[in-house]
Each structure stands twice: as C-alpha cells, then as structure tokens.
Image (cartoon, helix red, strand yellow):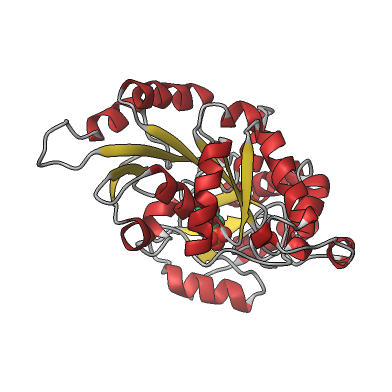
Amino acid sequence: MDLRSDTVTKPGDAMRKAMSEAEVGDDVFGEDPTINRLQEKVADLLGKEAAIYVPSGTMSNQLALKTHTSPGDEVIVEKDSHIFNYESAAPSLLSGIQLNPVPGTRGLMNAEGVEDAIRPDVYYMMPTRLVCVENTHNRGGGSIYPMRLIEDIKQVAVRHNLKYHLDGARLWNASIATGIKVSEYATHFDSVSVCLSKGLGAPVGSVLTGTREYINRARRFRKIFGGGMRQAGVLAAAGLYALEHNFQRLAEDHEKARVFAQILCDSKQYELNIDHVETNIVIFGLKPQMKTDKFLADAKSLGVLLSAGTAGKVRAVTHLDVSMENVKKAAEILVNYRAE
Ligand SMILES: *Cc1c(COP(=O)(O)O)cnc(C)c1O
C-alpha cells in the first residue's frame, strides 16, 4: 500500500491505449495535434488565453518565474512552498532571482504577511516583482486557500504592481473539494501552473497558462531549459485522458484520506486534527517515544509505505492506485503497530 505520494500512480490499460493511438507531430514546430489539443483544453478549463505543455511541475513553475522576472528581482513565496523547498534553488540558477519566504499557517500566507515582505522602492534593495501561492498546499497537508485570502493577496499585488502566480499542482483537488471551478481560482492570477501527474494520474506532464503574449515568451524559455520536446503527443494523450477520466474521481481520494485520518484519530495513537484533512493528504504526528525513521521503516516492513513530513511528522497521500479497502487496511495496521 503505497501512500508516499499521488505521483506513484501508473498508467492503466485505457490510458496506455489512448497514448498508443495518439496523433503526433513535431511540437518544437508547434505541429503536434495532441499537445495542441491538450494546451487548448487546459487553457479553456482555466479560462486563460494560452497554455504550454512541459515535462514537470518544476519546469512549469520555473518557466513562470523566468517569464515574470529579470535577474536581480525578488519573488515572494510561502516558507513551506514547493518552489522554495523542492526546486533545487532553480530560481537562483535559472533566473538569477532571489526568493523571499513568508511564513504561513499550514502553507497559507495572509495579505499582511505578503505586504510586509514587499521591498520599499530604494536603489539598494531588490525590486519585488511577483507573489506566488500554492493551492492546494503540499507541505501544508493539502490545505485549500480560501478564495477570500486569494483575493486579499491579489489586492496587495495589484496595489504594488506585482504579478501573481499560482502553483496549482493540485488545483484540481481544491476545485473538487470546494466546488469552486478551476477557472474561478485562475481568474485572479497572471499565470497558473497545473500538474497532470499528481492526482490525475498521468505519467508525465504539467501545463503553464497565461496570456498569449506571456505564453509565447515562455515558449522561448522552455526551449532554453531543455523542455522543447518533439512527438510528445504520446505523453499529452495521457494528460488528456487523465483530465477526461480522473478529474471528478478526486472526490474518492479525498474520502479515502478522511477515512484513513478518522481511523488514526479514533485510535488516539497519533496526533492529528481531522479538520486539517481537506483533500488527499494526511499529515500526522507520532507519540514522543516514536522515532520517525524507525516508524517509516517498520510501517514499510508491514506493507505500508509513507513519507516523512516536516518536523518529524508523517505524510500519507491517497490516490488512484490505492483502494478504499487498502486505505482502511493501512490505517488498521498503523493503529495496531506498537514500537518496541
Ligand atoms: C509536485 C509539485 C510540483 C511539481 O513537481 P514535479 O515533480 O516537478 O512535477 C510543484 N508544486 C507542487 C505544490 C507540487 O506538489
């Protein structure tokens, strides 16, 4: 039972069939009909003018930063964000920019925190150019940005003439959990990145969206970053299949996460707040006598794969390839587990 991440899913027969039947062409010439279809579909879903298909969420975020900034600029991010923690200092390497991390609550910043982080307009400080938010928030435990917060931060960005980027790797999950359309979220942002390879279950791929002019500039940087692929329609076909078949079913992943969390909660053996389980990620704490590394190794030997969260906590993520039955079984195994 692999609950380490929603990235571990494997393409099933129907998705592989869609991939094998994909019409392809050279996408560096803009001639891959399947990639073009995927880009149009995602742009449409998010209510944006244009979209560009890229190999990973990291490239999508980094393209977004590169296209919004100039070397020497500063970008406001949340302290636990993916961009700040898991993208290998790419903003400094690829864009020559600096990140200014603002602390959040379960990954969510507020408008005051963002406004305080904006640099005054003096020559010896770097210009603040961009604000990034992450929805749902990965390290925050799949937490959802309330729309009100997105709007409040937007007002700050507009007032200070900053661009606004959404790392929406799991925006799909936020939308399914709240009933708010992805386009309703996206409308507040200059650029939105979404992943097809998380809960949607495609093997590869992310999409960056924005205005046509912005995406045209991003296309040049995608080539520079090594992301100009050729007959990648075979991969895009998996993305299209994922959007068509696996978007609505994210509700099941959320239900599995809630059931898993409730079993742990009821046992009183683990530390977690059930109200913090908003989507498909469950973060829980161990009793003080349990060491995280040993717990993860023991759980693995009992057939439950989990990953480490921050501050000694443990993370479980539900997805397409783990059934409700197995999720319950995994929770029961953890409840019956006793550290020697
Ligand atoms: C997974 C993820 C990404 C991108 O990850 P890749 O592994 O590069 O595709 C970006 N942001 C968030 C919040 C993520 O969870």
Inspect this view and state whether residue 49 appears.
yes
Determine whether, in the image, residue 165 is placed left or right of residue 206. left
Measured as percent of width and height from the top left, residue 75 is found at 32, 43
Indicate the quadrant containing the N terminus: top left, top right, bottom left or bottom right. bottom right
Residue at 46 percent across and 22 percent down: it is 151
Q: Which residue is situated farthest in the bottom direction here?
A: 301
Determine whether, in the image, residue 223 is placed left or right of residue 326. left
Residue at 39 percent across and 20 percent down: it is 155
Measured as percent of width and height from the top left, residue 3 is found at 63, 62
Q: Quadrant of residue 186?
A: top right
Determine whether, in the image, residue 328 is placed left or right of residue 275. right
Residue at 46 percent across and 39 percent down: it is 165
- Nearer to the camera, 251 or 298: 251
Q: Is residue 42 above or below residue 282?
A: above
Q: Give the mark count.
A: 0
Measured as percent of width and height from the top left, residue 196 is found at 67, 53
Measured as percent of width and height from the top left, residue 322 is found at 75, 60
Q: Is residue 273 above or below residue 66?
A: above
Inspect this view and state whether residue 142 appears.
no
- Nearer to the camera, 42 or 298: 42
Q: Which residue is situated farthest in the front direction here?
A: 29
